[in-house]
Amino acid sequence: MRTRGGAASATIPRVIRLLNLLANLFPVWVVVCCAAALVHPPLFDWFGPYIVPALGGIMLGMGVTLTAGDFVRVLREPRPVLLGVAAQFTIMPLLGWAIATAFRLPNEIAVGLILVSCCPGGTASNVVTYIARANLALSLLMTMCSTFAAIALTPLLTKWLVGERLPVDAWGLFLSTVQVVLLPVLAGLVLHHVAPKAVERVTPVAPLVSVILIALICANIIGRNAAEVIEHSGRLTAAVGLLHAGGFGLGYAAAWLFGYDKLVRRTVSIEVGMQNSGLGAALATRHFTNAQTLLCLAAVPCAISAVAHSVIGSVLAVAWRMRSPEGDAAEANQNSDSETP
């Protein structure tokens, strides 16, 4: 006869699997919420004041998953991590600037596209890497390192590439990035150290919470700027889609040029192609909202970016999962199961 404790123990893994399944459906939640915002724009207005705190919560969730061992692993094998981070902050920003220029996007929308292209890799890339059976440990390390690098690089690259389109307060962007990235991640690291049991209890829920928050951020931005999204939908969707398709393709090519195997190529491709769109949206909302109209066109490419990279990344993940190099996937992920997003 099964005891109550035994039944509870058997139930917990099923709940965790369900939470992971719901989190892995993140493209569906983002698309559904954004579509609902276009149909009825006021639906997500209530979430506007919570965009920056929500992004901080997502970063806190990332921080609690990090340990000192993660930093040690970077020092032991830094080359693929450095390649991914370097590709993140060269390929994507230059591609964003080139596309914004070639498409002759309106200034505020061009600024948003450049801003999101200068953001680090997003935590959603870890989910896609896991689904694709690529190198999950490497993906986690690249996301961690690019997030810390973004504290300085995102403001500097945005200021440089935006040029004369709009005034950019690089110092203000830096301070905002510190507030919504560095401080929550450091707080998460501290929590992991001082309250490991509490962190262990909430960690299974963190990915799904992050997905919900990203979907709400994107839906709020799409709803607030619904008329402009519809007006510029053709060029804007093409520009954002090309940015992410180019990131996936050029990221793969960069790893191939340096002689890495298929799993590393796929991991770098996913990391480069998927941006922290939530960070871009939060920064755009704080620094590029029109004081007169209260519209924030610069945040719109960031919201569409979340949809675009989620859809492209999911398609690639399924395709690569079906064509996983024999033996390599198991080896790449054998030590990463406990870190599954």
Image (cartoon, rainbow, N blue to C red):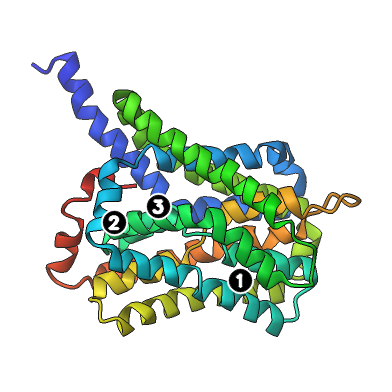
Q: Earlier in the sequence, mark 2 or mark 3?
A: 2
* Gap between marks 1 and 2 measured at Cα: 31 Å
Q: Is residue 310 left or right of residue 169?
A: left
Residue drawn at x 19%, y 28% as measured from the top left: 10
Going by the numbered disc 3, the residue's amino acid type is: Met
Going by the numbered disc 2, the residue's amino acid type is: Val
Q: Nearer the viewer, residue 271 or 88?
A: 88
Q: Earlier in the sequence, mark 3 or mark 1?
A: 3
Q: Is residue 217 left or right of residue 275?
A: right
Q: Which mark is residue 144?
A: 3
Q: Quadrant of residue 80?
A: bottom left
Mark 2 touches mark 3? (CB < 8 Å): yes
- What residue would you read off at disc 1? 240
- What residue would you read off at disc 2? 74
Q: Secondary structure at mark 2?
A: helix
Q: Quadrant of residue 34?
A: bottom right
* Gap between marks 3 and 1 measured at Cα: 24 Å
